[in-house]
Amino acid sequence: MNEDTKDTVAEAVVAEAKPEVAPEVKAEEPKKAEEPKVAKARGLTEDQLIAEYPQVIKNTLHFIETEEKQAVKITCGTEGCKNTREVRTSDLWQVKLCDTCTIKARRERSKAKRAARKAAKV
């Protein structure tokens, strides 16, 4: 017998000789009530965010690990539009429309400014 086989045979004999011990039974911990999700920047709960920003959709507060920021989904503020948009909680004060409606509104503002400049020249 070589050294390697002697070691594996010895380990097998030792393993068989050990008495089996019953695993310890841990007492079950009582389940804690689920804590409300909290926006880290200002320490607001999701309900407080909804009260302050009505466009926030309930149960959408989540943490984006790569950016280390929290985000929520909002509904578009344009009448008749039911699109949603994901927004960081730090931007909620300035975002009220979905991407499509934001582009449309920006174009309309631009056209209005251009028309006003054109009218001022005449």
Image (cartoon, rainbow, N blue to C red):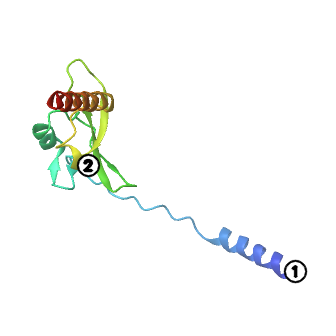
- Earlier in the chain: of badge 2 and badge 1, it is 1
Horizontal side, residue 22 vs residue 83: left or right: right
**Which residue occupies 20% across, 56% down?**
41
Residue nearer the viewer, 36 or 28 = 36
Separation of residues labelled 2 and 1 (CA atoms): 56 Å
Q: Is residue 32 above or below residue 87?
A: below
Rendered image: mark on residue 28: none
Residue 114 horizontal/vertical position (percent): 23, 31
Residue nearer the viewer, 9 or 43 = 43
Residue closest to the far right: 1
Residue 71 horizontal/vertical position (percent): 29, 45
Quarter of the image holding residue 29? bottom left
Image quarter of the C terminus:
top left
Q: Is residue 113 above or below residue 27?
A: above
In the picture of the structure, the residue carrying the numbered disc 1 is 2
Residue 97 horizontal/vertical position (percent): 24, 32
**Which residue occupies 19% across, 33% down?**
117
Kind of element beneath mark 1: loop
Residue nearer the viewer, 69 or 10 = 69
Q: Is residue 25 above or below residue 71?
A: below
Asked whether the viewer can see residue 73, the reply is yes
**Which residue occupies 21% across, 51% down?**
39
Residue nearer the viewer, 7 or 70 = 70
The three-letter code of the residue at mark 1 reads Asn
* Mark 2–mark 1 CB contact (< 8 Å): no
The three-letter code of the residue at mark 2 reads Lys
Rendered image: mark on residue 31: 2
